[in-house]
Amino acid sequence: PDEAYQKTFKNCDELLPTLPQTKGWWSVQLFQYHGFWIHIFGIRGSMLIHDHFKPRSTDIVVATSPKCGTTWLRALVFSIINRASFDFSDHPLRKANPQDLVPFFESIIHKDGSTSFVDGIPSPRLLSTHLPYSLFPTRMTDDTSACRFVYICRDPKDVFVSKWHFANKLRPKELPPLSLEETFDLFCKGVSHYGPFWDHVLGYWKASVESPKKVLFLKYEEVKKEPLGCVRKVAEFLGVPFTPEEENKEIVEQIVKLCSFESMSNQVVNKLDKRYQQRPISNSDFFRKGEVGDWVNHLSPQMAEKLDQITEEKLQDTGFNF
Ligand code: A3P
């Protein structure tokens, strides 16, 4: 790494032992950093972004708490901003998982040991993150002209169930599976990747109210119900509304269809079940059911009630509702 990067690495190494730590849901240790439980890689990535990233007014950041619809939102935004470049029958989304088309911000900021990789991405740069809004530097969040965020949230009950399934896939086979009850307690206490979940959501929600031109806030359930309207809303927010010609050609419909759970989960590339040492996640792990309300099949009425109660407390006086 270059010298400036080395300094940030060193700062991170010195900081980590001073932070509260806990065992994550799989084998990754989590540290409590500015109120959020994040793994080393994410913290270091956040510090590198903070110290070195040079934002551009055209940057677009797809932000999510894990399991809220990252894959879907990456696909939608990618296909919205690149709609003039590709044919829908031979689209990059038919050949690659969205995570390979929309780079993960806190990961690629590490690449090449300097900012040369992110600096080299042509505009408009489309990046994806799980980092909470409060961890981005003010030069990204204050200045209304510097970059935009598109965020998606989801009912905490569905998020928990999705996360529990995902964690069990990631968990090393030598370890016993995670019980639903044990994991539920951790989630309720806010101990989960990039958690507490509610604080993550509220950070972006408040920003979207204060700076509606900077942060667009979506709900998984709304996108499911009104995909066409949501796609139009995203395009408008990003300054590339659909033209009457595009509407006539049903481009919005084609984007929604291409990015739908049915279409994406059936692409050969997304059926791959291969895991690697460096990347213990396979493409197929990102597609499970893609439904609203699957929690009823997993949570007892008491669990659902407890989660709803926590949500109610957390949202009290915020004006926000899931
Ligand atoms: P379920 O586990 O409830 O099925 P993320 O992409 O943030 O990791 O979230 C994964 C969740 O989004 C999973 O939820 C997954 O099935 C769902 N998902 C993935 N692709 C989707 C799509 N194109 N449309 C709707 N939901 C999708």
Image: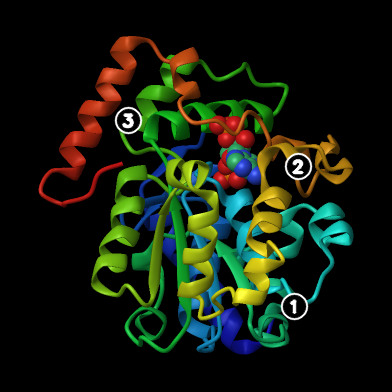
Q: Is residue 144 above or below residue 155?
A: below
Q: Is residue 52 above or below residue 232?
A: below
Label 1 vs label 3: CA separation? 38 Å
Residue occupied by mark 1: 112
Please, what secondary structure does the residue beneath circle 3 have? Answer: helix
Dot 1 alpha-carbon crowd within 10 angstroms: few under 14, some 14 to 19, many 20 or more: few
Instruction: Give the quadrant of residue 158.
Output: top left
Question: Looking at the rendered structure, which numbered label has been put on residue 188?
Answer: 3
Q: What residue lies at 46% left-to-right and 70% top-to-bottom?
A: 149
Q: Is mark 2 within 8 Å of ligand 1?
A: yes
Please, what secondary structure does the residue beneath circle 2 have? Answer: helix
Q: Amino acid at mark 2?
A: Ser
What is the quadrant of the N terminus in the image? bottom right
In the rendered image, residue 211, in percent from the top left (x then y), is placed at: 29, 75
Q: Amino acid at mark 3?
A: Cys
Q: Is residue 188 visible?
A: yes
Q: Amino acid at mark 1?
A: Asp
The answer to whether 136 appears left or right of 277 in the picture is: left
Ligand 1, by image quadrant, is: top right
Assess whether mark 3 and mark 2 are in contact (beta carbons under 8 angstroms).
no
Assess whether mark 1 and mark 2 are in contact (beta carbons under 8 angstroms).
no
Pointer 1 or 3: first along the chain = 1
Q: What residue lies at 87% left-to-right and 57% top-to-bottom?
A: 89
Residue occupied by mark 2: 263
Q: What residue lies at 62% left-to-right and 88% top-to-bottom?
A: 3
In this view of the protein, which residue sits in the foreground, 129 or 255?
255
Dot 3 alpha-carbon crowd within 10 angstroms: few under 14, some 14 to 19, many 20 or more: many
Q: Nearer the viewer, mark 2 or mark 3?
A: 2
In the rendered image, residue 117, in percent from the top left (x then y), is placed at: 72, 81
Label 2 vs label 1: CA separation? 35 Å
